Image: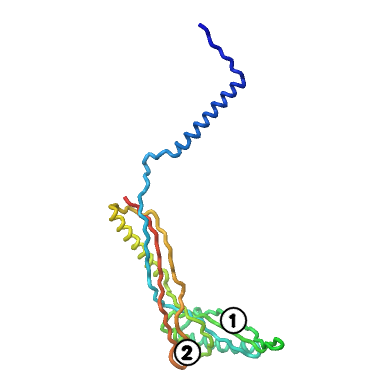
Amino acid sequence: MSLFKARVTGSELRSWVALAATAGLAIGIFAGPAMATSPTDGSNPAEHTISVSGSGKVVLAPDVADVSLGVTVQRDKASAARDEAGRIMAAVVAALHGLGIADADIKTTQLYVSPMYNYGSSQQISGYQMSNIVSVHVRDLTKLADVIDQSVSAGATDVQGVTFDVSDRAAAEQSARTAAVKDARAHADTLAAAAGVTITGVQSISENASTPWPWPGIGFAGDAAGAPTPIQPGSAELTIDVAVVYIIG
């Protein structure tokens, strides 16, 4: 009986070790992704859902208004313009107080004195202009025309605009939100019934609101001694949209 003996040199041994390591790495590379993407055991099955949208709208009838009014005067001297504007504005504020408008609802928004010029061969100051404008918050719309007319009677020279709003926007938004969610559920119920499935819960809800800013009214300041100033407050629409994902089973 003879024995086969082989001599393995150091360099050959290192080559075999390297080859074995490379083979092991290759096995790890190919086996790794297969393990990461292996299917689950079914203990957490994916949820089935229905995605729908709903919309809720509320027509806003205004119950408050803001009117911008005041006085502009021109005089030879700045001090004279200031004194005259101050006298007239004091009379305007007194008229507003007489209508039940509180100081907290009268806010100065513009106050300035500026020179006026004659533009000829040389630029010369010809006088001064003083302007004093206030914003008046009117909580009783039945007094709005009187606010304008009596202010003009007291000497106001400027009525710059009227805007309308609702005092309780939160209540209007809540009504629109509730209507939007009910609309979305009605759509989901229709789809679920047609598909023969049952809604078992809600996965997510998102909301998008379109809320109008205070909107301008239509009117004008007429002759204070004549007919009352006509004002048309109009209305605005508040819209809330929701997107709902329902779980079905």
Image: 134 above or below 52: below
Closest to the observer: 9 or 212? Answer: 9
Tell me the number on the disc at residue 111.
1
Crowd band around label 1 with a 10 angstrom C-alpha radius: few (<14), some (14–19), many (20+): few
Q: Is residue 231 left or right of residue 113?
A: left
Q: Which image quarter: residue 15?
A: top right
Tell me the number on the disc at residue 57.
none
Image: 177 above or below 218: above
Q: Position of residue 19 (x, y in %)?
A: 55, 26
Closest to the observer: 100 or 211? Answer: 211
Q: Which residue is painted at 49% across and 31% down in the image?
A: 27
Q: Which residue is painted at 59% across and 21% down in the image?
A: 12
Q: Which residue is painted at 69% across and 88% down in the image?
A: 120
User: Amino acid under label 1?
Assistant: Leu
Q: Which image quarter: residue 237?
A: bottom left
Q: Position of residue 39 (x, y in %)?
A: 40, 39
Q: Position of residue 201 (x, y in %)?
A: 34, 53
Mark 1 or 2 closer to N-term?
A: 1
Badge 1 marks a residue whose secondary structure is strand
Q: Residue furthest right?
A: 122
Q: Residue furthest bottom?
A: 225
C-alpha separation, residue under disc 1 versus residue under disc 2: 24 Å
Disc 2: which residue: 222
